[in-house]
Image: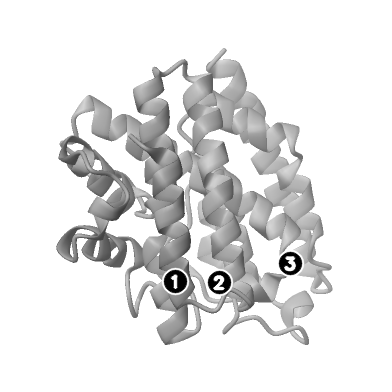
Amino acid sequence: MEFEKAKEAFKEYLKSYDVNNGSIALKIRHTYEVIRKSEYIALGLNLDEENIELAKMIALLHDIGRFEQIKVYKEFDDKKIEHAEFGIKVLFEDNLIRNYIADTKYDKIIQKAIYNHNKFKIEDNLDDIELLHCKIIRDADKLDNFRVKKEDEIEDSFPVIYNAKTINYEKISTKVYEDFMKHQCIKLNDRKTMIDYWVCIIAFIFDLNFNISLKYVKENNYIDILIDKIEYKNSDTKKKMEDIRVCAKEYIEKSLKMKE
């Protein structure tokens, strides 16, 4: 597996896109950061060199469908074009995968990992190695989503729905709040307000697969950082976000103790 060659092929692919676009730039950095986090998780799991390199290759390619999505639709909207499935089409139907990796023996693992990286839950009937790499890329992707939301402008993540004048006054939908308090991830169709979208990111903690991933969230203080990034001027929203803070931290602590 020639990972450095694959990175060069990725750079060539990006020449078709406007790297000065904030959303494109966000996804380029996200890709490289997910590579680092996939390697971090794989090393933490004591995987062999082959599987570490495979985890990095999957991370490099996991969001390749995002760039066309942004170029055409100007937003991250999987209702219009499902970026994971589109990425698979680009890689395997258009045979772009051979620009990145010559050996075909990894194709099914890569396909399954990319397909499942953004789904609400991992599909059934995967073999052990497919399931492992699905879990690694899902965790790495979520961990870097926390970094993105910490460091980048909110409007680059949500360019269409973001409204600087109203975000501080928006409410949490009842179902989104209740699902979070039940330790459940938020379904995309249940998100109605900008705060719902924000809570959806924080709820990623409930779908992290590995102890090392939960520790990473805790050590980087992402719960406090994300919650405190918005100034909540609606009193009900402010109270519920404090409930969410407590719920999230208690969940992480309890989960870490159970996995010790």
Indicate whether 166 appears above or below 55. Answer: below
Residue found at x 34% / y 39%: 134
- Percent across and percent down for residue 151 are 74, 58
Residue found at x 40% / y 46%: 5
Helix, strand or loop at mark 1 = helix
- Percent across and percent down for residue 222 are 72, 45
Q: Nearer the viewer, residue 164 or 196?
A: 164
Q: Disc 1 marks which residue? A: 67
Indicate whether 230 appears above or below 168. Answer: above
Tell me which label, 3 or 2, sits earlier in the chain: 2
Tell me which label, 1 or 3, sits earlier in the chain: 1
Residue found at x 67% / y 76%: 155
Say whether residue 241 is visible: no
Crowd tier of the residue under label 1, counting other residues whose Cα lies within 10 Å: few below 14, some 14–19, many 20 or above: many
Q: Disc 3 marks which residue? A: 237
Q: Disc 2 marks which residue? A: 24
Q: Nearer the viewer, residue 188 or 34?
A: 34
Report which quarter residue 221 is drawn in: top right
Residue found at x 43% / y 57%: 10
Q: Is residue 234 left or right of residue 172?
A: right
Q: Is residue 170 left or right of residue 51?
A: right
Helix, strand or loop at mark 3 = helix
> Marks 2 and 1: in contact by CB < 8 Å?
yes
User: Looking at the picture, which amino acid does disc 3 mark?
Assistant: Thr
Report which quarter residue 165 is drawn in: bottom right
Report which quarter residue 236 is drawn in: bottom right
Q: CA distance from mark 1 to mark 2?
A: 6 Å
Q: Nearer the viewer, mark 1 or mark 3?
A: 1
Of the 4 image quadrants, the one containing the N terminus is top left
- Percent across and percent down for residue 24 are 55, 71
Tell me which label, 1 or 2, sits earlier in the chain: 2
Q: Is residue 178 left or right of residue 95?
A: right
